[in-house]
Image (spheres, rainbow, N blue to C red):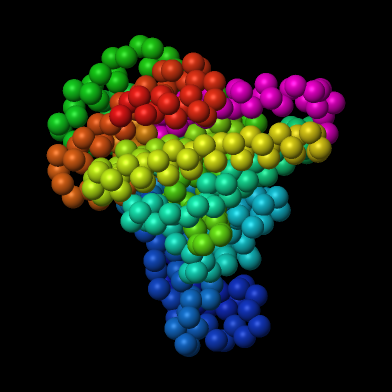
Amino acid sequence: MSQYRTFTAADAVAYAQQFGGLAKPAALVNAQEVGDGNLNLVFKIFDSEGVSRIVVKQALPYVRCVGESWPLTLDRARLEAQTLVEHYKHSPEHTVNILHYDPELAAMVMEDLSSHRIWRGELVSGVYYPQAATQLGEYLARTLFHTSDFFLHPHDKKAQVARFINPEMCEITEDLFFNDPFTDHERNSYPAELAERVVALRNDDALKIAVASLKHRFFSSAEALLHGDIHSGSIFVAEGSLKAIDAEFGYFGPIGFDIGTAIGNLLLNYCAQPGHFGPRDAAAHREQRLQDIRELWLTFAERFTALARTKTRDVALGYPGYVERFLKHVWQDAIGYCGTELVRRTVGMSHVADLDTIEEHETRIACIGHAIELGKFLIVIADQIDNVDQFIARVRQKG
Ligand code: SR1
Ligand code: MG
């Protein structure tokens, strides 16, 4: 019988004392539940001095932001912990350290990152971390290369694909990214003023075929172990440091999905700028986001290529010129998935603070409208954009 029970703060303290690996576990005395995501409980565990020392995270058997009417697998805690453990092996500087996990309790203990802040909040406040985009590119290159067919033995790769089968979490993405925004679905949520543009998405054949193709690859392209939800709310930053967290959507999928999600969230912030700052600062922050995107992609591509040249184990995949061809395909996928992130975060169920916190109504509508149009545009023209400088030029072209 399952031992699962939902943790109270006292349970979380006891769990951290037992599994946190601290020299003096009795020093841990209380817990505060700080989860602000859509899915889980997150407890910070404090010592008697009031210092946060460790974090306990537990999956609930339902979607937290909706309630018990939307049940959700507890196995996501195992998948999250195992994805982060795997990514930590390849990129320890940029992955949160999981100290312990327990599939029965759907719980894990992880390092405390109180010295860091969630990147989305910092982007919304206009706080710039000049190294973050490079570090994110590095994280993506290292984790995705070392879990791909370039590096893994074919038997090991297939065993890993099986270990990371994640049907229920993938179904959320399949629905929220590729179905809901392009149909009249009750989960959708968008300002009434934009209804006409939203209806236009449902009637755009070229758009829907491009989205079908992206969804098809999300279903079937087991290229590498993805984070699966690498938006700016799944990333902690501090000066000179970046750490990925929250990998419960991890599975073997198309590499372009992780890259596109990351770029998409930088673009959502780009679109939101006029809602948070006056024209001069908004323009400067927009320029930073475009340079972040450039830096992210170039770092990813350069590092992935360098790893492929020195560490590819497969004879055919190691053939000179092949990695460049593969990255071309990853890039075009990334643009398409980036477009779907823009559309689903504005039309679909799950929105972002970048846009939601814009106080002035008219400006908020204009920024959301901009993100929808930009997302749609990128999905449709993805295969006409050959490199990141062309991408930036196209983004500027759309305002
Ligand atoms: C029902 S979960 C909604 C969204 O929250 C997560 O962070 C993922 O982005 C998911 O799509
Ligand atoms: Mg999350």
Q: Measured along the vertical axis of the image, is residue 349 above or below residue 326?
A: below
User: Magenta stretch: dominant SS?
Assistant: helix
Q: Residue furthest front?
A: 280
Position of the C terminus by quadrant = top left
Q: Position of residue 385 (x, y in %)?
A: 50, 20
Q: Residue at x 48, y 80 (%)?
A: 51
Q: Position of residue 323 (x, y in %)?
A: 71, 26
Residue 1 visible to the viewer: no
Horizontally, residue 251 falls left or right of residue 306, namely: left
Magenta span contains residue 165: no
Q: Residue at x 60, y 22 (%)?
A: 329
Horizontally, residue 277 falls left or right of residue 90, namely: left
Q: Nearer the viewer, residue 172 or 232?
A: 232
Q: Measured along the vertical axis of the image, is residue 20 above or below residue 159?
A: below
Horizontally, residue 165 falls left or right of residue 375, namely: right
Horizontally, residue 65 falls left or right of residue 333, namely: left
Tell me the magenta residue range.
313-341
Q: Residue at x 58, y 30 (%)?
A: 254
Tell me how many marks there are. Answer: 0
Q: Position of residue 340 (x, y in %)?
A: 41, 30
Q: Residue furthest top?
A: 205
Position of the N terminus by quadrant = bottom right
Q: Measured along the vertical axis of the image, is residue 172 above or below residue 234?
A: above
Q: Residue at x 54, y 52 (%)?
A: 131
Q: Position of residue 294 (x, y in %)?
A: 52, 37
Q: Quadrant of residue 34?
A: bottom left
Magenta span contains residue 320: yes
Q: Nearer the viewer, residue 384 or 316?
A: 384
Residue 138 visible to the viewer: yes
Q: Nearer the viewer, residue 212 or 129?
A: 129
